[in-house]
Image (tube, coloured by chain):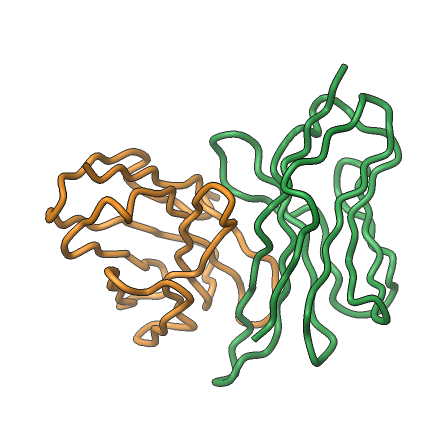
Amino acid sequence: AQSVTQLGSHVSVSEGALVLLRCNYSSSVPPYLFWYVQYPNQGLQLLLKYTTGATLVKGINGFEAEFKKSETSFHLTKPSAHMSDAAEYFCAVSELASGGSYIPTFGRGTSLIVHP
Amino acid sequence: NAGVTQTPKFQVLKTGQSMTLQCAQDMNHEYMSWYRQDPGMGLRLIHYSVGAGITDQGEVPNGYNVSRSTTEDFPLRLLSAAPSQTSVYFCASSYYGPGELFFGEGSRLTVL
């Protein structure tokens, strides 16, 4: 079974600083990779996804992530944090399961705190 | 376009009571699923469905039942609520395959 590890349950940065949220996965085949964001009292929404092709993926709100197969990683970055980026971020992996369905597995989430 | 609609948004139950969380989507998605979100645990899959009449268990299915009689609806039933089922529940749907999940706004359930 695949697993998703997000290093750090909380990440704190200053406004304008680089944001780096880490995600590592275990998968025996090339997976489909996602980052979702959850603002307080809301559901999750997609930030970006990797399916095939270019390994550097750009998403909404200035975020991007790079798929590194050799490191089984899909870290999320943003060059300059904004106060509005404060939220919970989830990494997810979809892999073909027995029975022919793609079942997403989520990491435990990383809470991004942005200081003025 | 409403997307994924969950009701109710808030519910308080007593131990042993039963209830149904409703989920409906208007995007003609084949795949629908229920997650629970608990602090520090991320999202854990309860049950999922890949089409009308087809359901399967996820990571934490005990204490929950589902059915999928139509493409649009995927209700989650708690037959005898327990305090351990206090959580925030999310319904999510997608096209069949490894696509993006679309989430509802969540249902916060408290079991006393």
Q: Which one is nearer the viewer's eye here, A110 or A64?
A: A110
Percent coordinates x, y for residue B69 in the rendering: 26, 68
**Residue A93 shown left or right of residue A53 in the figure:** left
The single residue placed furthest to the top in the displayed view is A116
Relative to B82, residue A41 above or below:
above
Count numbered badges in the picture: 0
Q: Residue at x 71, y 29 (%)?
A: A85
- Residue A54 percent across, percent down from the top left: 88, 64
Horizontal and vertical percent for residue B25? Answer: 41, 53
Instruction: From this view, report whether residue A3 is shown above or below residue A15.
Output: below
Q: Quadrant of residue B51?
A: bottom left
Q: Specify the farthest residue to the bottom.
A: A99
Which chain is drawn using orange?
A: B
Q: In the picture, which quadrant includes the C terminus of chain B?
A: top left
Left or right: B5, with B70 as reference point: right
Q: Position of residue A3 (x, y in %)?
A: 61, 66
Chain A on-screen colour: green
> Seen in the image, is B98 located left or right of residue B42?
right
Residue drawn at x 21%, y 50% as measured from the top left: B20
Q: What's the residue at 70%, 71% (across, down)? A: A31
**Quick check: A25 above or below A87?**
below
Image quadrant where residue A89 sits: top right
Please, which residue is most extreme toward the left here? B16
Q: Residue at x 70, y 62 (%)?
A: A33
Left/right of residue A100 with respect to residue B69 in the rendered view:
right
* Rendered view: A111 above or below A82: below
Q: Quadrant of residue B33?
A: bottom left
